[in-house]
């Protein structure tokens, strides 16, 4: 013998109450659209769970909130990562107590380089303590005005070269100068610093700025 509950009886004209639209689903979609990705994802997941339990409707809005929130979150992570990498690539170098790879934007007056890069765009360089053998040293910087007009590549190098000065003994020892100037593309990105580097065939030790250079 088995027993089953009777079928529910509804009076004529009576319908089962509609499930209400979940506020979490609406909030998930809105917060995701305005860029609060993580919040949108959390609210969207909560709304999906509630919808599965049959308590509310709005699963479509919740799913959209999760998807849009995920897209925003990924984009924000990429932007933040890019900003951090850019900051690390341009912040001044700490005290150099051993060979250290550096972005050219981190190099400043007094830094000594193990090798002098070939002509052209300058990539990462190796900075070393000046009491170790090195190929070149930054002996001056030229700062272009923030509102300066791009002077052309040759003009930029001429302006930077105007600050390059070698003593007679340094010239007699074979020292020469090279200039690093902003390129047009880096200028458009806000680069306004040029560097003058002194170098000697075969390299040297010490600093040309404090008179300790041994030019061989």
Image: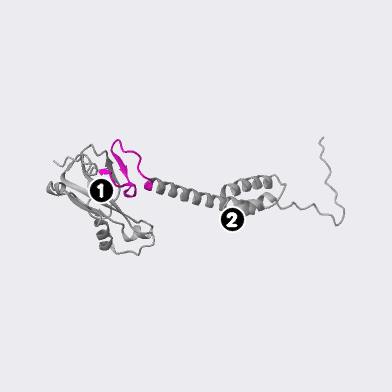
**Disc 2 element:** helix
Residue at the spot of label 2:
33
Q: Which x, y percent locates residue 25?
A: 66, 51
Image point 34% across, 60% down: which residue? 185
Horizontal side of residue 147 vs 5, given as left or right: left
Identity of the residue furthest to the right in this view: 11
Q: Residues within 10 Å of mark 1 (few under 14, many from 20)?
A: many
Compared to residue 3, the image places residue 75 above or below, namely below
**Disc 1 element:** strand
Horizontal side of residue 166 vs 55, given as left or right: left
What is the magenta range?
89-112
Disc marking residue 116 = none
Q: Between residues 41 and 200, which one lies in front from this camera angle?
A: 200
Q: Between residues 71 and 154, which one lies in front from this camera angle?
A: 154
In the picture, the quarter occupied by the C terminus is: top left
Q: Residues within 10 Å of mark 2 (few under 14, many from 20)?
A: some
Residue at the spot of label 1:
139
Image point 37% across, 60% down: which residue? 188
Q: Which x, y percent locates residue 69?
A: 56, 51
């Amino acid at each position: 013998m088995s027993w089953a509950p009777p079928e529910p009886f509804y009076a004529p004209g009576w319908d089962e109450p509609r499930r209400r639209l979940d506020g979490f689903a609406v909030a998930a979609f809105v917060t995701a659209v305005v860029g609060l990705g993580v919040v949108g994802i959390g609210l969207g997941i909560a709304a999906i769970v509630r919808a599965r339990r049959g308590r509310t409707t709005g699963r479509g809005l919740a799913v959209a909130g999760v998807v849009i929130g995920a897209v925003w979150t990924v984009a924000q992570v990429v932007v933040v990562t890019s900003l951090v990498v850019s900051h690390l690539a341009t912040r001044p170098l700490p005290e150099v107590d051993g060979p250290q790879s550096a972005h050219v934007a981190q190099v400043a007056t007094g830094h000594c380089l193990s090798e002098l890069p070939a002509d052209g765009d300058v990539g990462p360089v190796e900075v070393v303590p000046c009491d170790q053998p090195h190929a070149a040293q930054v002996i001056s910087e030229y700062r272009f005005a923030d509102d300066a007009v791009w002077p052309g590549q040759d003009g930029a190098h001429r302006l930077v070269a105007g600050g390059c000065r070698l003593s007679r003994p340094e010239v007699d020892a074979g020292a020469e100068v090279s200039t690093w100037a902003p390129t047009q593309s880096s200028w458009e990105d806000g680069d306004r610093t040029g560097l003058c580097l002194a170098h000697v065939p075969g390299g040297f030790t010490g600093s040309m700025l404090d008179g300790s250079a041994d030019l061989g």
